[in-house]
Image (tube, grey):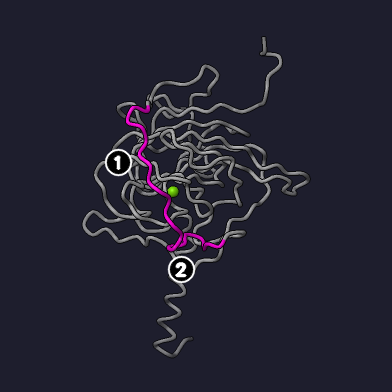
Amino acid sequence: MIQSPLLRVLAAQAVLLTLAAAADPKPTAAPSATAPKASPTGYTDTPLIPGQKWRVHDDARPRPAVVTPAETFSHGAGAPSDAVILFDGTDLSKWRAGGETEAPAPWKVENGYMEVVPKSGAIRTKDEFGDFQLHLEFATPEVVTGNSQGRGNSGVIIYGRYEVQVLDSFENPTYADGQAGAIYGQYPPLRNAAKAPGRWQSYDIIFETPRWEKGELVKRGNVTVIHNGVVLHHKQEILGAVAHRNVPKYTPHDPHGPITLQDHSNPMRFRNVWIRPLGGYDESAAK
Ligand code: MG
């Protein structure tokens, strides 16, 4: 029993902080329609990222330079002949609800795109993939609500572990390692190539799965990310599973897994999603 009123307040705050940490990786509550709660643009009290001089979500870490992508960069133009089509604008038959469930994907499909139904949960592919090339297009809400991580947030979460951030980073200050295209909590994108809210944008993501031998990590995973035709990461080694306000760590997993799209309470749209497993040079198919 805590007798001192001050100690009771401190204890209550500790419980709230614990609850907030347990809710990771969603960093903030969804903004309400009437009074959006301001989201922090960064932190000063988080641990250092291993091997870096910056803290996780460091408010002082320089934001990447803005580069305006080419106006003519084309989107929605189909897929290579050997791609696995994950979403062609008509249905979510290649997807199911996130987490350990067989439930159908709870997002809506209309006008050739899928849209996050806020708070319905993430969706993940039914199929699993090892090394891959993934293409997807997204649009952040045209009507801007919230700020920082509360604005136009989703994510491509590889194997449910490694997040390439999706965010409205158009004139929206937030911590560098949480911007659009960041390897969330680890590496900022090399540039900020975001388009304006409501505009269609593209990601091309090339991923090499971590290599394990007898449960030991022998090669980190790495990722290349191209945003609207601009390279954000080039074979960047991933430091471990995504964490909010905490350091990333690896834990052993299969050399394949699903692709998850995050529900971060914003009505994000996606279209033209396809993937090509990278199996290496196929001698039998060569001519
Ligand atoms: Mg996210």
Which residue is under mark 1? 196
The magenta span reads 53-73
Is residue 171 rendered magenta in the image? no
279 displayed left or right of 113: right
Alpha carbons under labels 2 and 1: distance apart: 29 Å
For the point 40% across and 33% down, the residue is 137
Quarter of the image with the C terminus is top right
Q: Please determine whether, in this image, residue 80 is positioned above or below residue 100.
A: above
Tell me if the residue at label 1 has its CB under 8 Å from ligand 1: no
Crowd around label 1: few <14 · some 14–19 · many ≥20 (10 Å): some
The answer to whether residue 103 is seen in the rendering is no
Residue type at mark 1: give it: Ala
Is residue 59 rendered magenta in the image? yes
N-terminal-most mark, 2 or 1: 2
The answer to whether residue 233 is seen in the rendering is yes
Which residue is under mark 2? 44
Crowd around label 2: few <14 · some 14–19 · many ≥20 (10 Å): few
Q: Please determine whether, in this image, residue 244 is positioned above or below residue 2.
A: above
- Residue 205 spot, x, y in % from top left: 52, 35
Where residue 235 sits, quadrant-wise, is top right
For the point 46% across and 68% down, the residue is 44
- CB atoms of marks 2 and 1 within 8 Å: no
The secondary structure that dominates the magenta segment is loop
For the point 68% across and 22% down, the residue is 281
Residue type at mark 2: give it: Thr
Q: Which mark is residue 176?
A: none
- Residue 163 spot, x, y in % from top left: 51, 46
Q: Secondary structure at mark 2?
A: loop
Q: Secondary structure at mark 1?
A: loop
- Residue 184 spot, x, y in % from top left: 49, 51
Task: Identify the residue at the far right of this view.
Answer: 214
Q: Please determine whether, in this image, residue 43 is positioned above or below residue 112.
A: below
